[in-house]
Amino acid sequence: MPVRRGRHLRALGLVPWVLRESRTAAVVDQAPPATASHACVLVLPQDGQPRAQDVLGRALLAAGAPFARAPRLVLAEGRLAEPVPVAAAYLVFGEPQARALGERLSAETLGKARIVLVDAPSTLLEAHGKRALWTALRQLRRVLTQDAG
């Protein structure tokens, strides 16, 4: 891994992944809490710029397995068409998506889950959007690590 990339990831509070041995893989691939079927679920708007979607995908891969493998729900016509899985955390991109998620989840699930709202993926092409996403990912990663440990 290039030294500069590793330095940037560590400055953002992320641990660069390097395949070494099975003990490292167990630490990186943390299990979700027992009550949730997923560690994290992403709720995205329907239309997105391809470049912004690419930046989002790379950020999720860099943040770790709970985010890279997270189910993605897409808002279509103001509603979430798919059933919403129970998760320890929800990363929601935009206020319309947050409203739709709130309508679909039970009060019990809303009370137990950690819900983080960030701007729509189109803002990821600007510095403040990337910064907000990294902050949200770090926050959720800490929460998921504490729940798993």
Image (cartoon, rainbow, N blue to C red):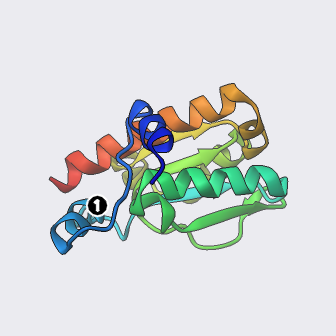
Label 1: state its secondary structure. helix
How crowded pointer 1 is (Cα within 10 Å; few <14, some 14-19, many 20+) is rated as: some
Instruction: Give the left or right position of residue 148, taking residue 47 as reference.
Output: left
In the visual, does 42 lie left or right of 99?
Answer: left
Task: Say if 135 sits above or below 149 in the image.
Answer: above
**Residue lying at 39% horizontally and 42% vertically, measured from the top left:** 14
Left or right of residue 78: residue 43? left
Q: Is residue 135 visible?
A: yes
Q: Position of residue 97 (x, y in %)?
A: 68, 49
Q: Which percent across, then down, holds residue 56?
A: 65, 51
Q: Quadrant of the N terminus?
A: bottom left
Nearest the eye: 43 or 131: 131
Q: Give the amino acid at mark 1.
A: Val
Q: Nearer the viewer, residue 104 or 66?
A: 66
Q: Check disc 1 and report the residue beneath it.
A: 28
**Vertical side of 135 occupied by 74: above or below:** below
Residue under the image location 71 percent in, 39 percent down: 124
Quadrant of residue 146 in the image?
Answer: top left
Would residue 76 be found to the left or right of residue 115 on screen? right
| Mark count | 1
